[in-house]
Amino acid sequence: MSRTRSITKRPRNEESSARSCRRNPLRVALLRLAIVTGFAWTASPLFAQTVTSLTCTPQAIIAPGSAKCTININQPATPGFFVNVIPANGDAVTPTSVAIPTGTATADFTATVGNITYDETSTLEAFINFSTQLFQLSITAQLQVATVLCANTLLASGQNTTCTVTLNKPSNSPATISLATNNTSLAVPSTVTIPAGGVRASFPAVAGPVANSQNATITASWTSTIASSATTIVGLGPAGLGSLLVTGVADAANNWSTNNCSPGSWRTISGGGFTLQAAQSNTPTTTLGGVQVTINGVAAPLSFASNSQVTFQCPTLDAGTPLQVKVTSPNGSGNVAIQTETAAAPAIFVVDAARNDQGMVLNANTTNLAMPQTPGVASSPAVKGSYVSIFATGLGALQGDSPALAVNAVRVWIGRILVSPIFVGAANAGTGVTQVVAQIPVDVISGPLVPLYLEVVTPGGAVLPSNQVQIAVN
């Protein structure tokens, strides 16, 4: 995805003015009325009360934990007055609204967070009558098991593989991880030790005799200050059969499990025994490494195939069309749990190699990810008022060419502010990838973890949200 569409800033008009409005239809209506009539609008007493501050104590908490937060408004509350509260990003949980007692100008609420795997900053937002206050809550994850993964996810009887267990951060002392399986046909050691200062250790997994294809789940567990565990699945098959095994299917953009297709979107089948050698094609082809995926009997374009994954493109069919998806290789065939075609299933590509939940969002006319400057990664925060290119899949059918444009309406939410994109269409990056170009609002929050997501509005009026990603904004 090295090329992006050039951006030309358009003159300000009613649509770009409304772009900075929050999700409040009254405000949009009043703004448009003022533009059409030329009349100035001033706040009435109904909108006189505003949020003046939002604070939390402590500012930094260790998960799981909580903080006491306080909202202040500019004048004593009238009966029934309340302030809306939302976590703008992160894993903190708050009430959706906080009542301000009549005659007072302050109220408290509790922000809580359960166990999390990685450190994060959660931005809390309190708003009413077009006024907003933000507070960034620093949340520290406790030392724990993060993942356990195996190099090969399908073993025939007598075969073995190397698995690796990983902590979420280095341990100051040796960490002895307990290992177990739910299937006696897969043998693993009872423990593996991660050395002090390290984050991972490897161990063998050996398949015993089995008469038919089956799964085994490996569990790695450890208790430091909290109990934690992670699991992975290994498929087992009879010796000499080289069995193919399908264990799941996910959206290729964000790795979320799914059971549907949408026009032109990409899906990744997981399992084992697909092919002995990984193969990739920048030009979609119907066969890779001897692997083929058929949808209702028609071969689907493929972009990647390995022993454990196959990525294919969904067809353009009417919403509601039943689908029968099958993957076939020299090792056999298997059915994929995709059932129907949907009008859209929006998903923003995630660049987990850069950082967790970092979206494939580039600063306009550059190849820099919109994230904090990071050594080894082309990156720089987006600037308020500038444009970004968001790369996604599953936004629905496209029409026309040079470029093909989206049929469905697409909206962008950046830091809880609704933005109308200036372009939604096929990206130069490749078939099935859609580029959405939008402007960073000048009044959006600043920080390294500004939330961003898309909404697709179908002709029938259905609103379909994408996954939420993070970008950095200065």
Image: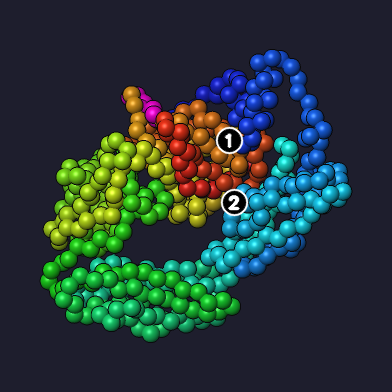
Q: Earlier in the sequence, mark 1 or mark 2?
A: 2
> Mark 2: which amino acid?
Asn
Nearer to us in this view, 337 or 177:
337
164 sits left or right of 373 in the view: left
Q: Which mark is residue 89?
A: 2
Q: From the top left corner, tell me how far across and down residue 178 is, in percent.
A: 43, 82
Q: How many marks?
A: 2
Residue depicted at 36% across the width and 52% down the height? 258
Q: Which residue is mark 1?
A: 418
Does residue 172 appear anywhere in the picture?
Answer: no
- Say which element carries label 2: loop
**Part of the protein shown in magenta:** 401-407
Q: Residues within 10 Å of mark 1 (few under 14, many from 20)?
A: many
> Mark 1: which amino acid?
Leu
250 sits left or right of 51 in the view: left
448 sits left or right of 68 in the view: left
Does residue 67 appear anywhere in the picture?
Answer: yes
Q: Which mark is residue 302?
A: none
Q: Residues within 10 Å of mark 2 (few under 14, many from 20)?
A: many
Q: Does the stretch in magenta take in 5?
A: no
| Res 418 → quadrant | top right
Q: From the top left corner, tell me how far across and down residue 304 is, in percent.
A: 27, 50
Q: In the displayed structure, would residue 53 be above or below residue 69?
A: above
Q: From the top left corner, tell me how far across and down residue 92 is, in percent.
A: 62, 58
Q: Main secondary structure of the magenta part?
A: loop
Residue depicted at 40% across the width and 53% down the height? 256
Residue depicted at 23% across the width and 42% down the height? 301
Q: Residue furthest top?
A: 37
Q: Label 1 vs label 2: CA separation? A: 15 Å
Nearer to us in this view, 87 or 162:
87
